């Protein structure tokens, strides 16, 4: 991180935190773009991770997750929840 930041003279900062603990107060601002690459399958509570990160985004939130590319192969997690947190869904994810 530090090598690339210096080489590219990028105006970025490193923040040590869990995804669940990220807040505007902790980071000091919100962002035009939030990129979550291949992270949801590595979290214990993917919806909590999304709920923590979404308020940090005032523009575009990009979720990137690799899906199996074999014909007929099912993804590791399949979202089956509703369209809003108020939905009366029993399950949000299926294995």
Image (spheres, grey):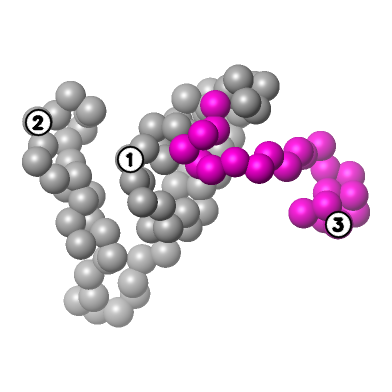
Q: Which residue is mark 3?
A: 3
Q: Which residue is mark 1?
A: 47
Q: Within 10 Å of the Cα at label 3, are there few (<14), some (14-19), or many (20+) other Cα atoms?
A: few
Q: Residue at x 38, y 58 (%)?
A: 41
Q: Which residues are magenta?
A: 1-23
> Magenta span has 39?
no
Whichever of callouts 2 and 1 sits on the residue coming sooner in the sequence is 1
Identify whether 60 is placed above or below 19: above
> Magenta span has 20?
yes
Q: Is residue 61 visible?
A: no
Looking at the picture, tell me which residue is in the foreground, 13 or 26.
Answer: 26
Q: Secondary structure at mark 2?
A: loop
Whichever of callouts 3 and 1 sits on the residue coming sooner in the sequence is 3
Q: Residue at x 17, y 36 (%)?
A: 82
Q: Within 10 Å of the Cα at label 2, are there few (<14), some (14-19), or many (20+) other Cα atoms?
A: few
C-alpha separation, residue under disc 2 versus residue under disc 1: 15 Å
Q: Secondary structure at mark 1?
A: helix
| Total numbered circles | 3
Looking at the picture, tell me which residue is in the foreground, 94 or 44.
Answer: 44
Looking at the picture, tell me which residue is in the foreground, 33 or 19.
Answer: 19
Q: Residue at x 33, y 72 (%)?
A: 68
Identify whether 4 is placed above or below 21: below
Q: Residue at x 9, y 41 (%)?
A: 90
Q: Residue at the bottom extreme?
A: 70
Residue 75 location, x and y as percent?
A: 27, 66
Identify whether 74 is placed above or below 48: below
Q: Which residue is mark 2?
A: 88
Q: Is residue 6 left or right of residue 44?
A: right
Residue 65 location, x and y as percent?
A: 42, 58
Whichever of callouts 2 and 3 sits on the residue coming sooner in the sequence is 3
Residue 32 location, x and y as percent?
A: 60, 29
């Amino acid at each position: 991180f530090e090598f690339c930041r210096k080489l590219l003279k990028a105006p970025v900062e490193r923040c040590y935190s869990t995804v669940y603990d990220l807040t505007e107060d902790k980071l000091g601002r919100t962002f035009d773009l939030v990129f979550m690459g291949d992270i949801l399958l590595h979290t214990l509570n993917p919806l909590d991770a999304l709920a923590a990160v979404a308020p940090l985004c005032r523009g575009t939130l990009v979720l990137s997750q690799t899906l199996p590319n074999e014909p007929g192969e099912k993804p590791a997690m399949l979202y089956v929840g509703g369209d809003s947190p108020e939905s009366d869904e029993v399950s949000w994810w299926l294995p």
